[in-house]
Amino acid sequence: MSMTYKLSEIMPPAFFELHRRIRAGEVTEALCEGGRGGAKSSFISEEIELQMMRHPDTHAVVLRRKENTLRRTVYNQYIWAAGALGVGSKWKATVSPMELTYLPTGQKIMFFGLDDPGNLKSIKLPFGYVAYVHFEELDQFRGPEEVRNVEQSLLRGGPIAITFKSFNPPASAANWANQYARESKPGQVKHHSTYLETPPEWLGPRFIADAEHLKALRPMAYESKVTEVSVLEHQYIKGTEEVTLFEGVAEEGDIIQFEEPAYGLEASGFSVQSSGANYAVLSAGTGTLTGKKYVHMTRDVRVPVSEDEVSNVVEVKEATLVSLTNSAAVAQRLAGYYQYIEALDHEVVYDGERPGDVVAFEHPYGGESKGCIKDTAITMGGRLVASEQAVIGYVPPKFETEEVLDERVVLTGSGDYTVPEGVYTLTVVCIQAGTGAQAGFDGEPGGGTQLIVTTKEQDAGGSWSDTQADGGEGGQKGAPGAGGKVYRATIDVVPGQVIHYECGTPGVGGATNGAVGAAGGETTFGDLSSAQGASSEIGYVDPVTEEELAKPGTEGVDGAAGGRGGQASSRGGDYGENGEDVPPNTGGPGGPPYGWKFDDYTSENVRIYGGGAGGGAAHGKDGEPGSDSPTAVGGAGASPDVPKTPDKIGAGGNGGHGGGGGGGAGGLFASAEAYGPSELPAGIWITKDGGSAGKGSPGSNGGPGGVILYFGVRKKLVSGPIRDKSGRALLDRLGRRLIV
């Protein structure tokens, strides 16, 4: 059913955008809070009736904690709304049962108290489904569990499901409704309103007159709306860059302060007596102080505060003690503070109050209220008078209500995670499994030698020889595998909620001769995935344990070259060269030369051999020696050890090592000078082989994927004196015991 209306005539401008978003289907929960005169209940009653008249198969349920408060409050509000919309004649109001019926369709708005939750079981709809639920005075309900149970029982079976929750923020920040207002979830829109945004004709002359009178007595200040707070989270990771921190003459006990934090201090010319992250105490002397820099990483944590046409973001950037463990709590605390835009200026007889203290006072627009002292100026005289400004409605949350992330859980493999009792937010880090590393390359075989006769006729004194052969090059190292992608997010949860997770399987390393490793598997936690993140060279450092995760693996080690074979001549042969080393492993030693006299010049034996060279070493293995027999062959190159597979979550695989090069064969020489003219067969007389090449090792697999959860459990205080760790009662500045 269509309906024509002029928006400016039926609701305050402050609610136009919320109305638009509800009509566009973007809202599943409207959380409306603010002081008296903010028109939140007026808006909600009009909005529900407007939406019902647009959707003829929908109904609404309106709730208060106590049934006996319905008729004089929210029930009358909905009757007013029908009249304000100009459709009062189309709505029929009844008291028993307490409901409003839209006559053209038979749709119903039903009113219930939760004195007896069983009342909701009596709801019988003539058709359609419940699409709208309104919790009036949300803070008076027992808590989020009660509210959630009602929502689950009422909102089921239709395409539209919108919950409206309205309340005046209680003075106590520990009240569950204030805590709930600082949390966020998909489809939720938070709206804060004050009397200043309500048309004066809606409030009436009496309200305005009282407000002006009290305003004159107690001036009000109104801050600009803050739409969002931005808190920069800091993390310092040990880096590798070395820096000079001090150079010169130091006196005994001199304190050297660093411009940036450093670790791994090393001194020459004097000694470090004591040190911290940003200073060192030196002994007397002249010298240099060096250290290694930390890598400073940051993350922007944002929390919405209110909606406004003009963006106004409060930024906190230089608070370097803000870390992963407390950033969410700091951001939520700031958001809780900046949602209050009213401040009261007043003068009091000073009684020791300080900024941050909570005080009670008469609100300029009626009733008692509480607030937090923002600043104080004390005037000295016959008595101490303080000019104070208090933020109305804001009460700093107690530490026990803050969700400091002091709990940590690591998940591997796959399964279902159950949210513990008292946990409402989780900071989730999804880490992909590491990529497998590249295999090391094979070495090259050593060169061989041959003795060749080129003519059949040779003069007396002729000779046949070949130079020694070179050793083979060592194989190249394999590249490391990349660390897994890391994605981090903070999500709202409820105790007992079950979330499925799958941790990625490690990427397989390359098997042979430079083969590339495979990528690691994706890690998921509910709807979150490591695929949404990125990998980096510095990986992820756990702020609790300082464990380095998701880092790239280490590269392999090159194999060493084989040596060159020994030369042979009529004067004798040389030793083959040793193979090259890969410390602490050594190349194979070169073989000795060999000489042999013979009488039958037609024999295939030769007279002089140079020694075969040693094979090259590889990581973890020595090269083989060159031949020490008449064979003159080169030694084999070493095949390296296999690199260790990392066990750290998300770690990249370690690169394979290169194989050692084979040693070169020794040179060959033959002489026939003792014989007369002769005829020798042409062609190859003998061949000597170089040493075989070492095989490169496979690259290792990557580390497994994993999920790390950080959360805080809201502490419950036990009534009685507050005590320290030793059991002693804590006292205030006047010596009185602190009681809760």
Image: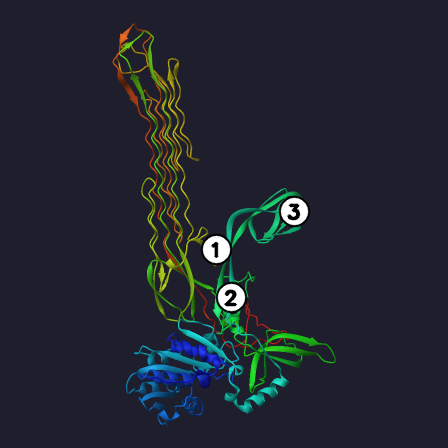
Q: How many marks?
A: 3
Q: CA distance from mark 2 to mark 3?
A: 44 Å
Residue 382 x, y percent position in the rendering: 74, 80
Mark 3, secondary structure of its residue: loop
Which residue is at 58% across, 87% downward?
A: 211
Residue 601 in view of the camera? yes
Against 622, residue 60 (above or below) is below
Q: Is residue 445 left or right of residue 83?
A: left
Report the quarter where the N terminus lies. bottom left
Residue 125 x, y percent position in the rendering: 30, 86
Mark nearer the viewer, 1 or 2: 2
Q: Which residue is mark 2?
A: 230
Q: Quadrant of residue 534?
A: bottom left
Q: Earlier in the sequence, mark 2 or mark 3?
A: 2
Q: Check disc 3: other Cα within 10 Å, few if <14, some if 14-19, many if 20+.
A: some
Mark 2, secondary structure of its residue: strand
Q: Earlier in the sequence, mark 1 or mark 2?
A: 2
Against 437, residue 498 (above or below) is below
Q: Residue 283 shows which numbered tag?
A: 3
Colouring convention used in this rendered image of the protein: rainbow
Give the amino acid at mark 3.
Answer: Ser
- Tell which of 258 and 52 is nearer to you: 52
Give the amino acid at mark 1.
Answer: Glu
Q: Is residue 101 left or right of residue 334?
A: left
Q: Which residue is mark 1?
A: 546
